[in-house]
Amino acid sequence: MYKKILVAYDRSSQSRAALTTAIEMLDCKMAENVIILSVIDNHEDDPTFEIAARIAGLIDDPTPLEDKTPLVELETSLVELIKDHDAQCETLVMRGKAADVIVNAARDYGCDLIMMGRRGVGALQSVMGSVSTAVLRNSELPVLVTR
């Protein structure tokens, strides 16, 4: 049994599958708590990233991070998925390089498993390197990658 599972969540269908699996583990008493982590990359000040992201079709118009409320948006997007597990689920939004943030947050929050989807943001991410591969390479904790 796992005490805490960290689920990397970016609203993709793959990360949703990972979260659904973690919720099922709560239902089956295979886990006690789930931490749902959304990472905001620090690329908003990097013009090279912005140009590459536009070419890949990942962004149309940059929106300053300050104009958003990422934690509220995350919680709103999760309402249906975790409605029966509010007491067992915690939501976090952190800023930084996704793989590093995921590995460090899992360690800092005392998690004993990291769950994530196999693919997240798509074409640009696959060119720059897979977040799940980087987490697998850098984590001392077990990592479950779902499809």
Image (tube, rainbow, N blue to C red):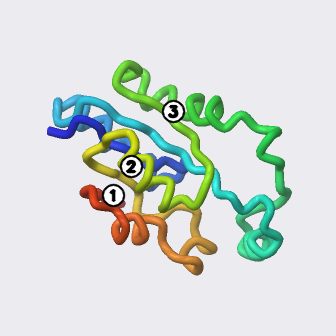
Q: CA distance from mark 1 to mark 2?
A: 7 Å
Residue 112: % across, % down: 25, 46
Q: Is residue 118 left or right of residue 60?
A: left
Residue that appears at 23% across and 35% down = 3
Residues at circles 1 and 2 in contact by the CB criterion of under 8 Å: yes
Of the image marks 1 and 2, the number of the one nearer the N terminus: 2
Among numbered discs 3 and 1, the one appearing first in the sequence: 3
| Element type at mark 3 | helix
* CA distance separating discs 3 and 2: 13 Å
Q: CA distance from mark 3 to mark 1?
A: 18 Å
Q: Which residue is mark 1?
A: 146
Disc sitting over residue 48 in the figure: none
Q: Which residue is mark 2?
A: 17
Q: Is residue 40 left or right of residue 37?
A: right
Give coordinates of residue 47: x percent, y percent: 82, 71
Relative height, residue 40 to residue 80 (above, below): below
User: Identity of the amino acid at label 1?
Assistant: Thr
Q: Quadrant of residue 45?
A: bottom right
- Local packing at callout 1 (Cα closer than 10 Å; few below 14, some 14-19, many 20+) is some
Picture quarter with the C terminus: bottom left
Residue 22: x %, y % from top left: 31, 41
Q: Is residue 90 left or right of residue 40?
A: left
Res 78 label = 3
For badge 2, the amino acid type reads Ala
Residue occupying image coordinates x 52% and y 76%: 129
Question: In which quadrant is the N terminus drawn?
Answer: top left
